[in-house]
Image: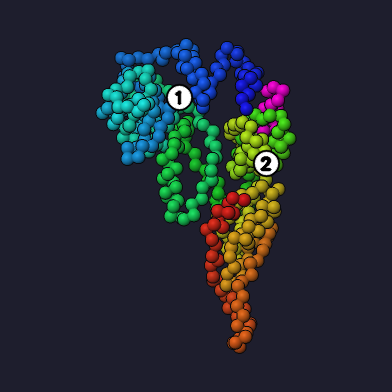
Amino acid sequence: MCRHFQVVSQMENLFDFSPSEILYVSAKNGTNVSSVLEAIIERVPCPQVKLGSPFRARIFDSWFEPYRGPAVCVSVLDGAVVKGQRIRTYHSNCEYEVLEVGIMHPEMRECLYAGQVGYLLTTMKHVQDATVGETLYDLSIERHNLQALPLFRPNASCIYASLYPMDVSEYSILRESVHKLALNDSYNGERIIRLLDASHFPKYPSDIDHFLEPVIKLTILIPNQYAPEVDKLCTEARGERVDWSAMDTESSMQQWKLPFAEVCGDFFERLKRITSGYATYNYQPDGYERAEIDLLVIQINDRPVDEFSQIVPLRVMKERAKLIVRKLREEIPRQQFEVRIKATMGQSKKTIAETVIAPMKKDFTGRLKGNFGEQKAGKERMKQIGRVQIPKEAFVNVLRI
C-alpha cells in the first residue's frame, strides 16, 4: 500500500525538507521519472572543470570483467584520458596503462573529457585495487603538486548470507569468487586484519586483564505497533536503548547500542520477520566495550574440535553448550566404539554439558564362545586410536544454530 503522504511528513520532520523539494517518483512503474531528470538540470550545478589541465579523475565504482580484469567507473575532473595513456593512483601509488575508454552505455570512445562520467579498462589486476574515492592522475603531474581527493567514508558492512563449502577443496573457489565481487570499499589508507576465531583464543587466562568486544549503534525506523517486539529482540541481544523519538503519530525511530557479535547471525532476518518487513535500519561501529566472555570448547572423545569451539558470553554459555552437544548427538552416526561428546569452558576444562553415543552392538553369543571382557577391552582400544567419522553436514548444521 502506498504511504507517500506519511513518508513526506516523516521527511519534513526528520530532514527539514519543504514539500516543493520532494518528488513523487516510482522507478518500478516509470511514474514521474522525467521530473528527476529535470530536477537534476535545474538543481545540480554544472561541474567546474579544467579542460586544459592534466588528467585527474575519481573512482566511484568498479566491477570485474571476465578475461579483461576490473572495469573502473570514473568521474573525470580535469583534462582528458585516452587509450594508451599512463596513469597513477594517488593513495596506493600504483601505475597502470589505459587499455580501453568508454561511457556508461557501454560504447567505445577514443577519449573521456573533464565533466564526463565513464569507465576505464587498465592493466589493473584485482578489483580490490579500485578503491572507491581513489584519485587517478596523469604521470606528467608531480605527486607533491597534485590536489588529491579524500577517500570516501567506508560503507557499513552488511551480512547477506553465510556460506560454508561442503567440500574443503572448494574454499579456494569461494575465496576467488568473493574477491571478484566488489571488495573495493575505501579503507582510509589502513589495512586491519583481525583473527577472531576460537582457535586463536589466549592460552593463559592469567595473562588476560579483560576482554573487549566491538559494539555498534543501531538505528531502527518502525511502525509503533511493532515496538514491543523490537524491544524484546534487542534486549535479548544484550542491547541498550540510547534514544527514542517519534517520527509521526504512527512510527518512531529507536537507537540501540548492541554487541556486533549479536547481529552477525540472523538478527536482521528476525527483525524483518517480527515487523512484517516494515523495519528500516542502519548501523555504524561505536568502539569497544568490556565483555564477560570465555571460550566454549567442544571435545569428541577428549579431542578438541576447533571447528565447533566458539567464543561465547558467560550468561549464555551453559545454554549454548547444551544446544551444540544435543545437535552433535543427532548429527554424528553411531560408530563401532563409544563416542563421548563434551563441552568445556575455557582453559579451566570445567565440563558444562556432556552426552554419549552408544556403539553399534553385535551379538555373536549365539554361535561363538568369546570372552566379553576381551571384547570390551578391544572396544576401549578402538575408542582411543579410532577417529570419529563426522559428516560434513554436521559442521554446517552446528554453525547454523
Whether residue 136 sits left or right of residue 268 in the image: it is left
As for residue 83 lying within the magenta part, the answer is no
Given the image, on which type of amino acid does mark 1 rest?
Pro
Sequence-first tag of 1 and 2: 1
Residue 118, given in percent of the width and then of the height, sits at 36, 25
Would you name the residue on which mark 1 appears? 150
Tell me if I can see residue 331 in this picture.
yes
**In the image, residue 234 lies at what x, y percent?**
68, 38
SS class of the residue under badge 1? loop
Specify whether residue 243 is in view: no
Foreground residue, 110 or 344? 110
Secondary structure under tag 2 reads loop
Looking at the image, residue 96 sits to the left or right of residue 13; the answer is: left
Q: Which residues are magenta?
A: 241-256
Q: Which residue is drawn at the image coordinates 61% and 71% (left, top)?
A: 359
User: Is 375 or 331 nearer to us in this picture?
Assistant: 331
The residue sitting at 35% across, 25% down in the picture is 103
**What residue appears at the point 54 percent right and 37 percent down from the top-left corner?**
158
The x and y percentages for residue 32 are 51, 18
Q: Which residue is label 2 attached to?
A: 237
192 or 26: which is nearer to us? Answer: 26
Residue farthest to the left, as pictured: 84
Give the answer, above or below, for where 138 lies relative to 259.
above
- Residue type indicated by callout 2: Ala
